[in-house]
Image (cartoon, rainbow, N blue to C red):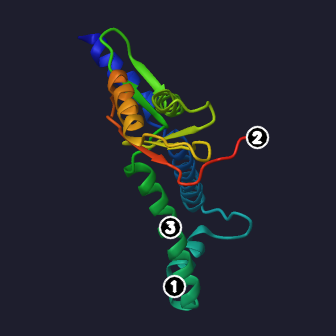
Amino acid sequence: MTNDRLYRRILRRETSASRSGTVVVAVLVLLLVAAAAVFAAALVFLGQRALGVDPRDVVDAAVRAPRGLDTTIVVGVAAIVALVGLVFLTQGLLPQRRPRHTMSSERLAVVVDDEVLASAAARAARSATRLGPDAAVGTVGRRTVDVVLRPAAGVDVPAVAATDAVAEELRTMRVDPPVTPRVRVQPTGRVDG
């Protein structure tokens, strides 16, 4: 039972991107703001000035500033703060996915790169249609595998057979999350020479 939990954790970590960079930036900004507030509070407590400026005068000026400033400056600063907040919010809420899928296994935690899935799908389509090595290109999305077949000019390609071959290849791989194959044949053939 502990292996299942461990494998789930490993698979989640390998398929999801880390948010540590965003967290480090947020913590550094908060530390700078907190250090400035503590420094200003210490100056007020000791009755000192920093570079000839009293921290209480700075706070009073900041409170009065929106009334005395041009509205475009206030709106511009508010827009920048809102944009930074929106970036942090989206980083925290949206899923950060790496281009990988997992495969079912009883004994191991298996992670497959999407390029490997694309290559396997293209190979299966080429085998079913007897095309050359450069005649099929695969791409993988979150839930789909797209294979584009580029046969030589004048060659008829059975798209249904290629789709069935790709579907069977993906079924034997047992990819999670499951992916749906889509095979397209380019209408214009290539000329080899």
Q: Badges 1 and 2: C-beta atoms under 8 Å apart? A: no
Depth check, mark 2 against mark 3: the one in front is: 2
Residue at the (54%, 90%) spot, across then down: 71
Which residue bears the numbered disc 3? 83
Q: Is residue 43 above or below residue 17?
A: below
Marks 3 and 1 sit apart, C-alpha to C-alpha, by 19 Å
User: In the shown orientation, is residue 14 left or right of residue 38?
Assistant: left
Task: Choose between 5 and 108: the one closer to the eye.
Answer: 108
Q: Quadrant of residue 151?
A: top right
Q: How far from the left and from the top, in percent, is residue 37?
A: 54, 58
For this orientation, the residue located farthest to the front is 154
Tell me which amino acid carries mark 2.
Answer: Gly
- What is the quadrant of residue 69 in the picture? bottom right
Residue 149 image offset from top left, x and y in percent: 53, 42
Q: Residue furthest left?
A: 1
Q: Residues within 10 Å of mark 2 (few under 14, many from 20)?
A: few
Q: Which residue is mark 2?
A: 193
Residue under label 1: 66
